[in-house]
C-alpha cells in the first residue's frame, strides 16, 4: 500500500512537473527564458518545453494606453512574460511644443513600431513603450523648435519623415524598428487660429478682387479690339466702295469722253452741265421749295445743254 502511494505521488509530481515545463507560445509572439537568473534562450511559436524551477520566463513591465467610453485616455501598467512581435500602434497623449517663433501649440502624435530583437527589448531598456513615448516627446519638441509656425503647419510630411529617421536610429539598440510616425493633430492657440482664419479670408477676398479686375480688364480689351476691328472693316469697306465707284465713274467718263470726242464736242462742258443739273435737282427736291434762283451762269449752262442736244442730233444724223 505504501508503495502504491509513493508511485502515485511520483506520477503526480511528474504530471505537475511536465505541465509546468510545457509552454505554448502563440503565433507572432515570443518568450525569453532565463535559467537560474541568466538568459538561456528565446521560445518561438508552438509547443516548447523548459525545466521547471530552474527555467523561468522573464517578466517585463509594459505600458498600455487605451480609451474609455467617453474617449478619455487611460494609462495602464502591466507585467507580461510574452512579447508581441506584430506591428504596434502607440497613440501618445497631446503635448505642448514651442515653435521657433515662440508659438505654443498642442500636438498629438501616433507612432508605429515593431520588435525585431526580443533579447534587446528585455535587457537593453526598461518598459519599452514608456521609453519610446519619452523619446518621441523630446524629439518632437526638438524638431518643432527648429521650425516656425507656418512651416510646421505646411510641412507635416517633412516633420513625420524627420521624426521617423531620428526615432528609428535611436531605438535600433533596443531591438525596435520604427515604421511610421504621424502627427495626428496640430492645434495652435485660439487667438493664432482666429488670426490665421482672418488672414485666409482676406487672402481669398484679395484673390477674388484680382480675378474680377483681371476679368474686367480682359473684357475691356476685347471690347476695344472688337470696336477697332469693326472700324477697320467699315473703313476698308467704304474705301473699297469708293474705289469701285471711282473706277465705275472713270470708266463712264472715259466712254463719254470718247463718244463726245468722236462727235467733235467738248467733254468738259458736257460733264459740267451734267453735274450742274444734278445739283439743281437736289436744290428743288424739297417739298417746301417754291422759288428757284438760277445763277448768272445758267444761260451759259442752258446753251451748253442745247449744244449737247445739237451735238447728239448731229451725231445721230451722221450715223
Image: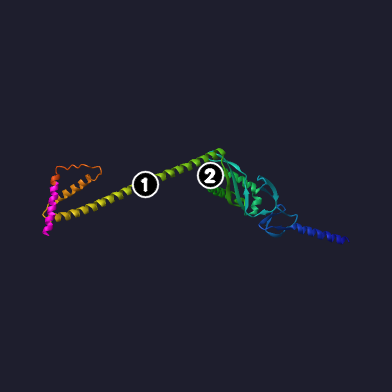
Report the front residue among 182 and 63: 182
Position of residue 12 measured from the top left corner of the image (x, y, whole percent): 81, 59
The residue singled out by tag 2 in the image is 153
Count of numbered badges drawn on the protein: 2
Q: Which image quadrant: the N terminus?
A: bottom right
- For the residue carrying disc 1, how many other residues have a C-alpha within 10 Å: few (<14), some (14-19), or many (20+)? few
Sequence-first disc among 2 and 1: 2
Q: Using the image, tell me which numbered label, if any, was put on residue 274.
A: none
Q: Hey, which quadrant is residue 216 in on the image?
A: top left
Q: Is residue 268 visible?
A: no
Quadrant of the image containing the C terminus: bottom left
- Report which quarter residue 134 is drawn in: top right
Q: Is residue 18 above or below residue 135?
A: below
**Residue 36, image x, y percentages:** 72, 53
| Residue 160 coordinates in the image, percent (x, y) | 55, 48
Residue 306 is covered by the magenta coloring: yes
Q: Relative to 277, is 118 on the left or the right?
A: right
Residue at horizontal 35 percent and vertical 48 percent from the top = 226
Question: In this picture, which residue range is highlighted in magenta?
Answer: 301-319
**Magenta segment main secondary structure:** helix
Which residue corresponds to the image point at 86% horizontal and 62% vertical from the top-left?
Answer: 4
Q: Secondary structure at mark 2?
A: helix
Q: Is residue 234 magenta?
A: no
Q: Residue 186 versus residue 20: which sits nearer the camera? A: 186
Whether residue 185 is visible = yes
The residue singled out by tag 1 in the image is 223
Q: Residue at x 24, y 51 (%)?
A: 242
Amino acid at each position: 500500500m505504501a508503495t502504491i502511494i509513493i508511485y502515485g505521488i511520483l506520477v503526480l509530481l511528474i504530471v505537475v512537473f511536465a505541465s509546468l515545463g510545457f509552454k505554448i507560445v502563440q503565433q507572432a509572439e515570443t518568450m525569453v527564458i532565463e535559467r537560474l537568473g541568466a538568459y538561456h534562450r528565446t521560445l518561438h511559436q508552438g509547443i516548447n518545453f523548459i525545466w521547471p524551477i530552474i527555467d523561468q520566463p522573464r517578466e517585463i513591465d509594459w505600458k498600455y494606453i487605451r480609451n474609455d467610453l467617453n474617449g478619455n485616455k487611460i494609462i495602464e501598467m502591466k507585467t507580461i512574460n510574452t512579447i508581441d512581435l506584430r506591428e504596434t500602434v502607440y497613440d501618445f497623449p497631446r503635448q505642448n511644443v514651442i515653435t521657433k517663433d515662440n508659438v505654443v501649440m498642442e500636438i498629438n502624435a501616433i507612432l508605429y513600431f515593431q520588435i525585431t530583437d526580443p533579447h534587446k527589448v528585455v535587457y537593453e531598456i526598461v518598459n519599452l513603450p514608456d521609453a519610446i513615448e519619452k523619446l518621441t516627446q523630446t524629439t518632437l519638441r526638438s524638431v518643432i523648435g527648429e521650425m516656425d509656425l507656418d512651416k510646421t503647419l505646411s510641412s507635416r510630411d517633412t516633420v513625420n519623415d524627420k521624426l521617423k529617421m531620428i526615432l528609428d536610429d535611436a531605438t535600433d539598440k533596443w531591438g525596435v524598428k520604427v515604421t511610421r510616425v504621424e502627427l495626428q493633430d496640430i492645434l495652435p492657440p485660439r487667438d493664432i487660429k482666429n488670426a490665421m482664419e482672418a488672414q485666409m479670408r482676406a487672402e481669398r477676398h484679395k484673390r477674388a478682387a484680382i480675378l474680377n479686375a483681371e476679368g474686367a480688364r480682359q473684357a475691356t480689351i476685347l471690347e476695344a479690339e472688337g470696336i477697332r476691328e469693326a472700324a477697320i472693316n467699315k473703313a476698308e469697306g467704304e474705301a473699297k466702295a469708293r474705289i469701285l465707284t471711282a473706277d465705275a465713274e472713270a470708266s463712264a467718263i472715259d466712254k463719254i469722253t470718247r463718244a463726245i470726242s468722236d462727235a467733235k464736242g467738248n467733254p468738259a462742258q458736257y460733264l459740267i452741265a451734267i453735274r450742274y443739273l444734278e445739283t439743281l435737282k437736289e436744290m428743288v427736291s424739297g417739298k417746301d421749295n417754291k422759288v428757284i434762283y438760277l445763277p448768272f451762269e445758267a444761260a451759259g449752262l442752258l446753251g451748253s445743254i442745247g449744244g449737247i442736244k445739237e451735238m447728239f442730233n448731229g451725231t445721230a444724223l451722221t450715223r
